[in-house]
Image (cartoon, helix red, strand yellow):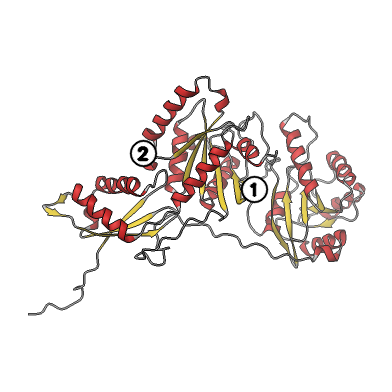
């Protein structure tokens, strides 16, 4: 992209609304509550003929450096340093407040081009109030309504004037975005009967979502992985609200990390804003390939932890468990044995799931965590040839034949893999509706052991075999 535009201002002036309009999608949470945005996020944007990257930031607040508002302000200052041009936004309905004047002076001292944006000008009397923005000394205010899309042409012209036409109209070819993968069984393998199995591509970009209960250490873990204070952290529970994506490279492989809001039990989620945060986190899970569920090692396997892990499995994503805060455990050997036993017992639907002990505070176990992620991703993409599957099926049926239902023996005829990500198989059977769930579990467990498929969802769909005589008239 040609340049980066950071949208800054005090809380509740409409920064995230403008960010969503420029990005062309509802990426940032928007609510009437001041201070919804806490971490800064960046996304490709478009404004008429301009192509650039837009940065949404937390609202400026005058607070101590150790407070939550002070840490949010520090994150905004980092985002400003990343930008080429700044859009300083004020609320035309409320007029200019003392905080606007103080932060306008801070922005002016950066020496970067500034576009003054007066938002919410669709209301009556807003034009008069917007004229007060001249007092800030940032030039003529651009009158816009981010919610209704008014004044976007004037905003485009102001940006071009601020950074120059040559820089504003510079073009870079955007990298193609990977399409989100579907979780359900579908025919995504071109030729299921082919005996040629493609090798795992270890250079392919990887998408990882980090989820868990509030205050489990998700943002701290991502900061430790990438080696910088990119995400807002602190002792307060529920700091993260938006799902923030962070680009990273691990051992030469491109990785996109998604930080998500903490997920509490549904009965405890009362506020609209928290419901929006959880819904945003669920979208990140659906877009990811591997999901790291972060558990607090001091209080692991709460009911909510198991429900979160079950959600990941039902979505068909590759699951990795990270036992965080391992530096606080006094008896690591005994605790580790207990956690492994609980993992196998409480998550039987992903038997053999990778579980790693880490400490985001000290950096311990981060490489082992990423190695577990890559191993699980490889299993999630695994393809098994039809010949091997049917040789195994013949042995499995001989060892444990399917039960007779209503006095008639079930006939299992054929099995093939029709999907990866996660592995999905189709079993041809004489009477699909009569196959017991217990026998399907036997087949799934046998597939895991025979073809080394630990820790990922394995799905088997039962279908009736084609009748070659269907539709033919009975010959006398």
Q: Is residue 162 left or right of residue 68?
A: right
User: Which dot marks residue 348?
Assistant: 2
Helix, strand or loop at label 1? It is strand
Of 458 and 389, which appears nearest the observer?
389
Tell me: residue 194, above or below residue 35.
below
Q: Position of residue 434 (x, y in %)?
A: 21, 53
Mark 2 or 1, which is nearer the eye? Answer: 1
- Which label sits on residue 135? none
Q: Which residue is mark 1?
A: 248
**Snapshot quadrant of residue 205:** bottom right
Quadrant where the image shows the C terminus: bottom left
Of helix, strand and loop, which one carries label 2? helix
Q: Quadrant of residue 421?
A: bottom left
Residue 151 rendering spot, x and y as whole percentages: 78, 61
Looking at this view, name the residue that lies furthest to the left: 476
User: Residue 161, image x and y in percent?
Assistant: 87, 62
Image position of 149 with respect to 248: above or below? below
Question: Crowdedness of circle 2 by 10 Å Cα count: few (<14), some, many (20+)?
Answer: few
Q: Residue at x 21, y 51 (%)?
A: 397
Q: Nearer the viewer, residue 167 or 16?
A: 167
* Residue at the spot 60% in from the left edge and 60% down from the top edge: 177
Please state the horizontal and vertical placement of residue 327, each as a whole percent of the image.
57, 25
């Amino acid at each position: 992209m040609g340049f980066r535009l950071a949208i800054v201002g005090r809380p509740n002036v409409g920064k995230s609304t403008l960010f969503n309009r420029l990005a062309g999608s509802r990426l940032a949470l928007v609510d009437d509550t001041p201070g919804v945005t806490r971490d800064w996020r960046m996304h490709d944007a478009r404004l008429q003929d301009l192509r650039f990257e837009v940065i949404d930031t937390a609202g400026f607040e005058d607070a101590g450096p150790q407070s939550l508002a002070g840490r949010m302000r520090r994150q905004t200052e980092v985002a400003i340093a990343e930008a080429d041009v700044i859009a300083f936004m004020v609320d035309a309905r409320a007029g200019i407040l003392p905080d606007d004047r103080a932060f306008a002076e801070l922005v002016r001292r950066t020496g970067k081009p500034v576009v003054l944006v007066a938002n919410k000008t669709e209301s009556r009397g807003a034009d008069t109030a917007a004229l007060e923005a001249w007092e800030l000394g940032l030039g003529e205010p651009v009158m816009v309504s981010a919610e209704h899309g008014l004044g976007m042409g004037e905003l485009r012209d102001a940006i071009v004037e601020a950074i120059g036409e040559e820089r504003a109209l510079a073009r870079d070819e955007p990298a193609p975005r990977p399409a989100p993968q579907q979780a359900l069984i579908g025919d995504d393998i071109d030729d299921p009967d082919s005996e040629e199995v493609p090798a795992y591509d270890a250079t392919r970009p990887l998408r990882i979502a980090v989820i868990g209960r509030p205050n489990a250490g998700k943002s701290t873990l991502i900061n430790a992985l990438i080696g910088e204070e990119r995400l807002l952290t602190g002792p307060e529970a529920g700091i993260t609200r938006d799902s923030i994506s962070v680009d990273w490279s691990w051992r030469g492989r491109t990785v996109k990390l998604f930080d998500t809001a903490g997920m509490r039990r549904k009965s405890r989620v009362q506020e609209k804003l928290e419901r929006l945060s959880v819904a945003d986190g669920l979208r990140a899970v659906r877009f990811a390939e591997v999901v790291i569920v972060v558990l607090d090692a001091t209080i692991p396997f709460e009911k909510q932890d198991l429900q979160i892990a079950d959600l990941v499995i039902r979505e068909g994503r590759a699951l990795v468990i990270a036992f965080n805060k391992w530096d606080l455990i006094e008896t690591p050997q005994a605790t580790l044995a207990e956690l492994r036993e609980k993992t196998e017992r409480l998550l039987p639907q992903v038997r053999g799931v990778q579980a790693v002990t880490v400490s985001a505070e000290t950096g311990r176990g981060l490489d082992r965590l990423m190695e577990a992620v890559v191993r699980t991703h490889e299993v999630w993409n695994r393809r098994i040839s039809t010949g091997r599957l049917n040789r195994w099926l013949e042995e499995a049926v001989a060892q444990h034949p399917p039960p007779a239902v209503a006095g008639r023996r079930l006939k299992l005829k054929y099995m093939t893999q029709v999907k990866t990500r996660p592995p999905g198989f189709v079993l041809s059977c004489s009477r699909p509706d009569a196959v017991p769930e217990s026998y399907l579990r036997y087949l799934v467990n046998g597939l895991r052991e025979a073809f080394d498929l630990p820790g990922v969802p394995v799905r088997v769909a039962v279908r009736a075999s084609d009748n070659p005589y269907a539709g033919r008239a009975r010959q006398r």
